[in-house]
Amino acid sequence: MDYKVFLSIGYGMYLVASQDEGQLNGQIANAIVQITAEPPTFAVSINKENLTHSFIEKSRAFTVSILGETTSMKFIGKFGFKSGRKINKFDGTNFKMGKSGLPIVLDHATAFFECRLINSFDVGNYTVFIGEAVNAETLNDSKPMTYSYYREVIKGKSPKTAPTYLDKKKITKKKESIMSKYECTVCGYVYDPAVGDIDNDIEPGTSFEDLPDDWVCPECGVGKEDFEIVEE
Ligand code: FE
């Protein structure tokens, strides 16, 4: 089977939010599709391990903010790569409470809708929640972000086959001796060799290049390939 075929399916970028006993949480999702026109119903696929999953099950409702092309990697890192069990993602986030009593994230959103849960389907590690829209509003005229825009434009990287591709190892070789800092392009965490990463047994004085290949960003969990050198 050619799994690359599935990469050609188009998606958007959304923020799905819910609440449980006053605790708010939300996460980035791309797998949302409209199922029926009238009443408008939608399917949302959410991983069972995510806190938002249990909030949707308990409140039997969710909100969907449609993210615009201005959405930053830092914002996506916060809602897409961090767990609501460790941080309150709504700290420092602009939101309002909707008619359903659930939070609606307004930062970077071009529109939103609120759904009450009408059905759900167990699909292995995921649940497909079916919601019926009870409210929908346009916030501004910014362009909704597609998943391919996020992959190709926001990350701003060139594939190895592109003439503009720069091998980072080649351009950073000279700087290895002074042990540069590296920044996570997803969440903004900065690896400082002078500090190391004590929580993950990385001693101070360890250069970024000497970090084990399986080392991941302690904040958002992406690998070394998503880090860029901090020019000083
Ligand atoms: Fe990170």
Image (tube, rainbow, N blue to C red):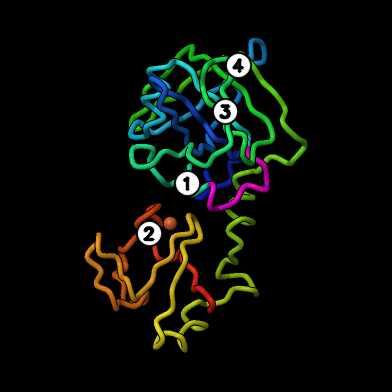
The spot of residue 67 in percent (x, y) is 63, 39
The spot of residue 191 in percent (x, y) is 39, 68
- As drawn, is 180 to the left or to the right of 15? left
| Amino acid type, residue under disc 2 in the picture | Cys
Camera-nearest label, 2 or 3: 3
- At horizontal 48% and vertical 36% (from top left) the residue drawn is 90
Camera-nearest label, 3 or 4: 3
| Amino acid type, residue under disc 1 in the picture | Lys
Per the image, label 4 sits on a secondary structure element best described as strand
Give the residues drawn in magenta, as a range. 67-75
CA neighbours of label 2 inside 10 A, class few (<14), some (14 to 19), many (20+):
many
Q: Pointer 2: what residue?
A: 217
Mark with earlier residue (1, 2)? 1
Tell me whether the residue at label 2 lies in contact with that at label 3, contact meaning CB atoms closer than 8 angstroms: no
The spot of residue 151 in percent (x, y) is 58, 53
For residue 215, above or below residue 105: below
Per the image, label 3 sits on a secondary structure element best described as strand
Tell me whether the residue at label 1 lies in contact with that at label 2, contact meaning CB atoms closer than 8 angstroms: no
Tell me whether the residue at label 3 lies in contact with that at label 4, contact meaning CB atoms closer than 8 angstroms: no
- At horizontal 34% and vertical 78% (from top left) the residue drawn is 207
Q: Quadrant of residue 87?
A: top left
Instruction: Check if residue 71 falls in the magenta segment.
Output: yes
Which residue reaches farthest front? 92
Mark with earlier residue (2, 4)? 4
Label of residue 133 in the image: 4
